[in-house]
Amino acid sequence: MRPTSLAVLCVSLALMAVAIGAIVVRAMSGEPSPEAAAPIVPTAPADARPTDGPAITPAATPGTSGPTGSASGPAEHDGSRALSILQELAKGPRVSGSPAEARAAEYISGLLRSYGYTTEVMSFEFEGDRFRAGEVRLDGQPAEALTLAGSPGGEVQASAVYVGLADAAGVSGKDLKGKVAVADRGTLNFFDKYTNARDAGAVGLILVNNRPGPFSGNLTTLASFPVVSVSQEDGAAIVDAARAGRTVAISAPPTTGLTVALNVIARPTTASECKVLVGGHFDSVPGAPGANDNASGVANVIELARAAAVDGLDEGVCFAAFGAEESGLYGSKALVSRWQKEGKLPRYAINLDVTGIGESVEVIGDGQIARAAVAKGVSLGIPTVPSQLPANSGSDHQSFIDAGVPTVFFTSGDFSTIHSPLDVSGDISVTMLDQVGDVAFAVLNDLVAQVAQG
């Protein structure tokens, strides 16, 4: 994830600061003034706007599932196959703890089972998530929603009523009893919008942004029903539905201080002990389709799993898709912690993160495993260079390094659009995906040989 120039680093860090920091901090004391209101991130082109999460149902249920098929195709990494997986995952944000994350986990688990692996959907809890993402569903189609501070968790499904700004004029004369109010952001603070809707009998409130992109805020009170916000783009259809009195559903996460997120782990069999682990995170930040960060990396992980399985599953080789990386590397930490307690840490780990845009394969890590990875890439005729992360950046490789596991991290080095609506699948290079995957596959095979030698 190291930028290739100082200019890119500045842009990247600015995007990261805006997209992650401002999304929660802004409007903490209520609705900002019109002058202060601004998009939290650059707006994507209209034809590239995220719509919803991966179109897979049902959502994942924690537990272990056996294989449903066997791998086919070439016994080597195929960039076009990885791109197809990426495009499915990057249909919308996959925020840790959200229903979209659960659907993505089920999609990933299903693919890995179809290659012959036994999969486990591992749930874990973490505290202090800054996103608290939920959903608004209209005609069964989900739209990302952020839960306002002070809102309880819960599920609400009812007829929707559009109330304008949720001021006295907007609420007056509207039958809100037992219904969901849909209001525009602006003019009034969030507390007043909520109070007006509550006093009129509403059982839920959806706030639609008056600027492109998502937003979050603070009600400055403990609400009696779920209050969520949606982006201006997703909100247009919700406003139309409310004008027509159609049914909408709100899903807000609980307020216990803990968020439940998911890892997906693939093994040859239930009893297999993982000697080499290949992993990458599949969650994203709110408002970002997360194509490069990190549908690209986890798509490569899944494609590596397929390629490795074509000539038979290798005992001891496992694959993982980590949740809650964007919230603080929590998924990989949870897995490492469990394996430490069981005395089953892998001998080697490979991490892939941001692998779809760039000029060369960048290798991050210390020690022999990283040096050998660079040499392997060069020997294949693929531009491969040693690299390092910029300050205040991280990825799941760190969880394994902290546990003493030799780890190598592959990236393509360009994160200029990550954590923003601009991180779309249309900008992904299938050549770059393939080059990273080819080097990672060669390194994986070398590590498997080392493990076999004892």
Image (spheres, rainbow, N blue to C red):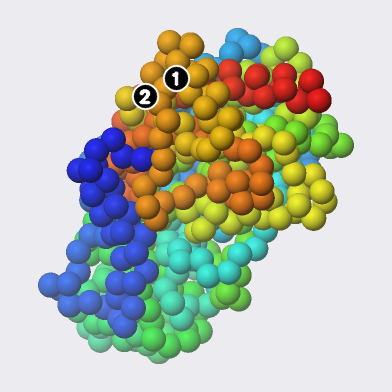
Q: Quadrant of residue 274?
A: top right
Residue type, numbered disc 2: Ser
Where does label 1 land, which residue? 435
Label 2: few (<14), some or many (≥20) within 10 Å?
some
Q: Earlier in the sequence, mark 1 or mark 2?
A: 2
Q: Residue at x 34, y 72 (%)?
A: 25
Residue 233 visible: no
Q: Quadrant of residue 45?
A: top left
Q: Is residue 8 left or right of residue 410?
A: left
Where does label 2 land, which residue? 360
Q: Residue at x 51, y 58 (%)?
A: 328
Q: Position of residue 246 (x, y in %)?
A: 42, 61
Q: Is residue 84 left or right of residue 194?
A: right
Q: Are marks 1 and 2 in contact (CB under 8 Å)?
A: yes
Label 1: few (<14), some or many (≥20) within 10 Å?
many
Q: Position of residue 302 (x, y in %)?
A: 59, 29
**Quarter of the picture holding the N terminus:** top left
Q: Going by the picture, which residue comes out furthest to the front?
A: 367
**Residue situated in front as seen by the camera: 423 or 222:** 423
Q: Secondary structure at mark 2?
A: strand
**Residue situated in front as seen by the camera: 375 or 124:** 375
Residue type, numbered disc 1: Gln
Q: Secondary structure at mark 1?
A: helix
Q: Residue at x 12, y 72 (%)?
A: 35
Q: Is residue 177 left or right of residue 337?
A: left
Residue 188 visible: yes
